Image (tube, rainbow, N blue to C red):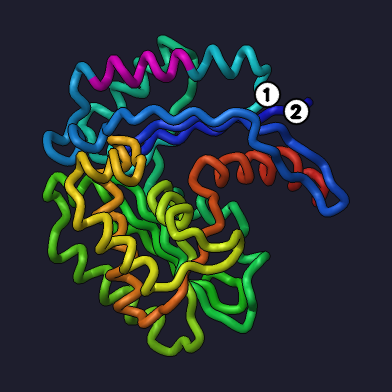
Amino acid sequence: MLRYAAIDIGSNAVRLLIADITKTDEGFGFKKNTLIRVPLRLGDDAFLDHRISERKMEDLLKTMAAFKNLMDVYQVSKYLACATSAMREADNGAEIIKKVKKLTDLDLEIIEGQREANIIYSNHIEENLDNKKSYLYIDVGGGSTELSVFVNRIPIASKSFDIGTIRILDNQDREETWEEMKLWVKENTKTLKNMAAIGTGGNINKLYRMSDEKEGMPMSFLKLKGLYNNLNAHSLKERIQVFGLNPDRADVIIPACEIYITLLKWTGIKQIYVPKVGMADGIINLLIEENLVQPAYK
């Protein structure tokens, strides 16, 4: 059994996805074997102090050591470990990478926003899209939001913005960044008709489950707005108790809603599809493309 692993070091959580690679008539795919999520909240340090604190660094090193041991036990043959927004902004990011390498022998890559967007798009969601529609692809993370516009299943524009859930909670989002995002979205969607949105990330997945929509059906803007109003009417403690949200989801879900709702308002989009994939899935697909698909064309 061929196994690949993805490590996604985000601003809110750190994830390990171990996947079994499968071969079909259409090519290669994967089945999720093990997914572990550790809510380290590196963004709190990075966005406020521009460095990861000693305590969080220790927690990250312990997490990476645990991930490495699991990868060894599962006999993972290829992996890719990517750190996003929080590590991009931490002045001691390079130092942490060296420590991770020394302790675990894992190679960690701090990726730029555009590469982050490209990895997420490795999920090839566009293959299942209706080519009569245009799409705004929205991936909301703790430190950044990646946007892409698809026309006829082809991405015509994509950009990463420093607007994310942890950044908003810490009051580190800037008005000019919101304005820049608004201008970009308006400019790249102004001629498009019949648009829908695609949302990825932990928060929109949770919101979709809460919406009770039938699998594969889009969630309406009105339903998203209703969920937001309902969640926002409850305190943090109530959101944990009433809705059964994890403590590290109960606070970030509010700014996540605000980002999605704002983007849908700017574009007049009425529906959002939620395909239940994210950064870790994108990394596995990228590893498949780089190691299994390309040699066939050489």
136 relative position to 226: left or right: right
Label 1: which secondary element: loop
Where is residue 252 shown, x and y percent of the image?
Answer: 27, 46
When asked about the image quadrant of residue 204, the answer is bottom left
Residue identified by numbered label 2? 2
Residue identified by numbered label 1? 77
Where is residue 36 shown, x and y percent of the image?
Answer: 49, 28
Q: Is residue 251 above or below residue 157?
A: above
Magenta span has 65? yes
Where is residue 156 shown, x and y percent of the image?
Answer: 50, 73
Q: Is residue 288 above or below residue 257?
A: above
Front residue (pair 77, 197):
197
Q: Is residue 208 above or below residue 92?
A: below
- Residue 252 showing in the rendered view: yes
262 relative position to 210: left or right: left
Front residue (pair 198, 96):
198
- Residue 80 showing in the rendered view: no
140 relative position to 254: left or right: right
Q: CA distance from mark 2 to mark 1?
A: 7 Å
Q: Amino acid at mark 1?
A: Ser
Q: What is the total number of numbered labels drawn onto the structure image? A: 2
Q: Select label 2 or label 1 by which is in front.
A: 2
Label 2: which secondary element: loop
Front residue (pair 212, 92):
212
Magenta residues, as a range?
Answer: 56-66
Instruction: Please name the residue shown 64% across and 28% down the image.
Output: 78
Q: Earlier in the sequence, mark 2 or mark 1?
A: 2
The answer to the question of whether label 2 and label 1 lie on touching residues, with beta carbons closer than 8 A, is yes
Neighbor class of circle 1 (other Cα within 10 Å; few <14, some 14-19, many 20+) is few
Q: Give the number of the disc on residue 295.
A: none
Q: Amino acid at mark 2?
A: Leu
